Image (cartoon, coloured by chain):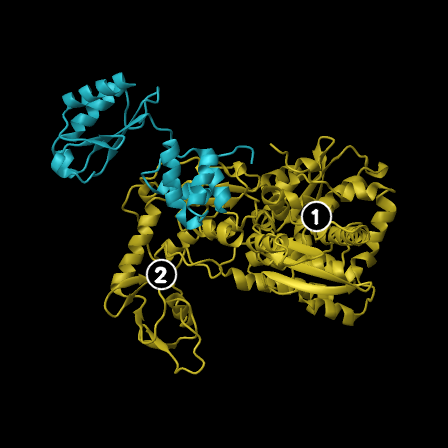
Amino acid sequence: MPQQYPEVDAILKAHGLSQSAIISILQDVQKHYRYLPEDVLIYVAKCLGLSEAKVYSVATFYDNFSLEPKGKYVIKVCDGTACHVRKSPLILNALRRALGLNEAKHTTDDMMFTLETVSCLGTCGLAPVLTVNDKVYPAMTPEKTEALLKQLKEAK
Amino acid sequence: MIAKHENNTEKYMLIDGLKVKLEGEINVLQVIRKTGIQLPTFCYHSDLSTYGACRMCVVEDDRGSVMAACSTVPRDGMSIKTNTKKLLKHRRMILELILANHCRDCTTCEKNQKCDLRALADRLGVYGVRFDNSRPVQPVDATSPAIVRDPSKCILCGDCVRVCDEVQGMGVIDFAHRGAEIEVTPAFGKSLSETSCVSCGQCVAVCPTAALVIKGQTQLVWDALHDPNKRVVCQMAPAVRVALGEDFGMEASGISTGKAFAALNRLGFDYVYDTCLSADLTVVEESNEFLERLQNGGPFPMFTSCCPGWVKFVEEKHPELLDNISSCKSPMQMLSAVSRKYFQRPEWQDGKETVMVAVMPCTAKKAEAARKEFFHDGKYDTDIVITTSELSYMLKEAGIDLPNLNPESPDMPFGLASGSGLLFGVTGGVTEAVIRRCMGVKTSEALQTIAYSGVRGMDGIKEAVVELDGKEIRIAVVHGLANTEKLIKEMQAGNIYYDFVEVMTCPGGCVNGGGQPLAKKRQPIREKRTTGIYNADGMSQLKYSDENPQVKSIYHDILGIGEAHKLLHVHYPHPQQD
């Protein structure tokens, strides 16, 4: 193995190199890299004695796993029923316009922002809601969203 | 789940009101099949795990619940109906939904009349599909030297995924994504050529549709046959002769050696040779190598080298074992090399280019022939490899009716083979042939002793101990790469020791190769083909490879001094360390 992944080794060790812990392992790997890099998945497969195709199968099954690098700020706009009827699509469109993203393109070229939708964040009382790196922003409007973006851009 | 019950009262279940005894069947489907009802299935194979994906074998219990018979455990007193109004409706609907996302170029599809999906649509009376195909068309992957994968024809039964993982331990392909986006693919959407695929073709053998097919090279053969400036030479492998007839309605265990050679002559090959002869050469070379290793102290175990899937497996997974593999070329490559040498003689210098064609039961042979180690002076030793299935396509296209041909024999000087050479077609055969050669005693009793030493049979890992010059030689015979991996792990852990190990990638050996005619019931067919090989060996007057006069004359007349090693051996280099 030409490349070494000490952080991944630590994660694998923490899960006892168990094949059945593959989901937890991938979650931890994603936490570290903010996505699942291909070379790391190949390394994980080799260490666990699983086929690459099996690991790829698990990684692509769950929406929570991403095989593409994500931006510094991951914005998740809730599009569950409650948020949707309280006009979350307008928020999503405002963000897409402001960041130059679309349905196929989720991450800005400068790797600052990734924009995703989620089906429900479970905080329907706060609708419409979005999260930035797991911090919840309730009762959003397109205007409030633009202000938030500005704040995030200045914070870099 | 159902335990054996010697002392218990007998258990029964009701199939369509008929009382059927339970005899340890692991699922309801097996019980139903005992009654003569052939429920349709795509994803059920007795040699693979039960998956329950295709839902064609749905049955209804007496409370009206619908379940898949393949994944339901039979219970005493259970009552099952197999053809209720509800079930017929469900089955047709399920099939219609499968068809909805399937490519419909059936008339020009190479699986055509052999397609299980098409056969079932006919059988269930599905003559229209009410839904649009919503699956985006994906490109065909033709990068592998042996296998073509067309995702638009995949019905997601998972047969290929399981055979690759469970039987071969490779796991090259698996399901990815989910819901409407689910697909069978190599990891990271790579092409097959970028994976560790060994080209064994077992996925092709189980695929019910044309999502996985053999990479056909028949057109190249036709082109060569039609070119007056080419001398087209053909060799036929041992396992081809016990299977080719199946595609023409002949009995599986029947040997169609003479008819097959006649068919090759009718196609227009200039010379037809028998790979069994070069299998004899392999036996001699491999035995010598083994005896040399015994003198020089190893390395042991010595692994056989005739199976190209196995060689690729070692390169991919166990490069540390490369030096343990015998340096002998496979019989196919030996015959090509030797006959090329033969056609270089002055009497053959007629301006014609010699084209070497091999008919093999194997898809991996296509990959083997294209290896760089076999490329000399601007030519590959073997130009074209076609499988048994491809040969039967050619015969059908030409209207050559195999069963009605009068038997003919292969041409000399490469047409005479011993029974030992024939044995290469089955698991344990190479070992049996090598033991025959190494043993000093050549009596029919000795042959029987070898046959019953443990090398024959369908056990995944077989062991035998023979005595050679007072020394005990420990032998293992393994088939299926998952079994092989198990054996290697045990050896590397120091739990077992062998001097000689024969490996065949395909379960059962070459008779069950990925290029053989497609069979519905894979296990019984491969056993019949095996019987065919043993019967042919039983009938052969020559039993020992080293007694084959043609083998002797090849060494004497064709191979010069020192040339035998160059032409009959190969070195597979270690993969470069990064």
Q: Supply the letter of whichever chain is yellow.
A: B
Mark 1 and mark 2 in contact? Answer it, CB < 8 Å: no
Q: SS at mark 1?
A: helix
Of residues B87 and B415, which is closer to you in this image? B87
Q: State whether discs 1 and 2 lie on one chain.
A: yes
Q: Is residue B363 visible?
A: yes
Horizontal side, residue B270 vs residue A118: left or right: right
Vertical arrangement, residue B18 with respect to residue B127, above or below = below
> Which amino acid type is shown beneath numbered disc 2?
Cys
The location of residue B95, given as percent across then percent down, is 33, 53
Which of disc 2 and disc 1 is earlier in sequence? 2
| Quadrant position of residue B257 | bottom right
| Quadrant position of residue B216 | top right
Residue ID at (69%, 53%) = B261
The location of residue B422, given as percent across then percent down, is 70, 58
Q: Colour of chain A?
A: cyan
Residue ID at (55%, 41%) = B196
Residue ID at (37%, 54%) = B53
> Which amino acid type is shown beneath numbered disc 1?
Asn
Residue most extreme to the top: A154
Closer to viewer: mark 1 or mark 2: 1
Of residues B544 and A78, which is closer to you in this image? A78
According to the picture, the residue beneath numbered tag 2 turns out to be: B57
Horizontal side, residue B132 vs residue B410: left or right: left
Mark number displayed over residue B324:
1
The location of residue A116, given as percent across then percent down, is 27, 31
Mark number displayed over residue B303:
none
